Image: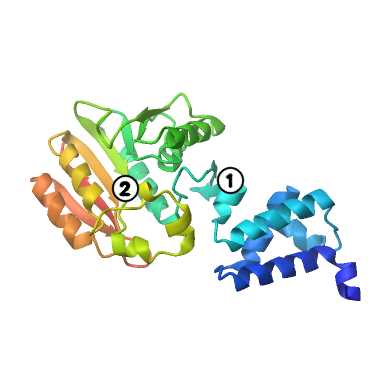
Amino acid sequence: MTDNASRNPLAQTLEQASQILAAAGCEAPRLDSEVLLAHVLGRDRAWLYAHPEYALSPTQSSAYQSLVSRRAQREPVAYLTRHKEFYALDLFVTRDVLIPRPETEGLVERAIQWVKTSSVPGTILDVGTGSGAIAVSLAVNLPRAQVIATDTSLTALAVARHNAAHHGVANRVLPLQGDLLAPLSGPLGLVVANPPYLSRAELAGAPPEVARWEPRAALDGGPDGLDVIRRLLGMASGRLGPGAALLVEIGAGQGSDVLGLAHRYFPGATVEIARDYADRDRMLFVRFAQ
């Protein structure tokens, strides 16, 4: 060990981990190394830079090396730490749920805006809730909102239930097992969904973090990526009354096809495709006049 390494063992540990992850093809090896080490030590990343002289205990070193090894197999960092930030909330995640993405925050933002400007009362329905990221974010930011969160997976619903309890909204988020809108009957006020929308080809070409580790059922949209979106729009047809709205996250480049489907299923409604900050198709917004 060099003299510098002996004086700064923490810095050396990070450098070695970064090299391992870089060789494994990880996109951000240094960041991953820091996040995993901060997780093991129960510190933030700034603490790591302030204490380069810190020496890991054997237990800490073993735990860290195990996480680095798993990350080198391209297991996502969020599954290793069991945490992911979404809409300024710290969410618990497991391999049973899709890892929340920043792109989906736009869906939450639009839903919040709609609720605050709409006079239509009623429950919000989050379809395919997974970790509960959308449902919990809406409940936290809309103190009077009642949210029903559906999913076919009981293990995913357990994660959503955990996140709702952790953020103090368990009394306003109701997880229900079922396919899309099937658990509910009658008219709907606001429906939000981040359904599977990757085509089979896109899924096959996705990074290992996605294709190998995330739940396929939350990603696979069929041959053209629109299978689940078609079913969702078909099930919602006729159930969105005056003043109701539907918000669905879509894949980049799907806007034209989804727009056509929406016009077919919701004649008379105002239909638009919203684009994200990178100017890509990102969201279907359907709304009915009062």
The kind of secondary structure element at disc 1 is loop
Q: Which mark is residue 82?
A: 1
At which x and y percent is residue 107? Answer: 35, 49
Given the image, on which type of amino acid does mark 2 rest? Pro
| Colouring mode (rainbow / by chain / secondary structure / one colour) | rainbow
Q: Position of residue 56 (x, y in %)?
A: 82, 55
Q: Is residue 118 left or right of residue 239?
A: right
Q: Is residue 52 above or below residue 190?
A: below
Can residue 143 be seen in the rendering of this structure? yes
Quarter of the figure with the C terminus: top left
Quarter of the image where one finds residue 205: bottom left
Q: Which mark, residue 187? A: none
Pinpoint residue 194: horizontal percent, then vertical percent: 34, 47
- Amino acid marked by disc 1: Arg
Splitting the image into 4 quarters, where does residue 116 fall? top left
Q: Which mark is residue 195?
A: 2
Among the 4 quarters of the image, the one containing residue 266? top left
Q: Is residue 52 visible?
A: no
**Quick one: label 1 or label 2, which is nearer the N terminus?**
1
In this picture, residue 138 sits left or right of residue 120:
right
Q: CA distance from mark 1 to mark 2?
A: 22 Å
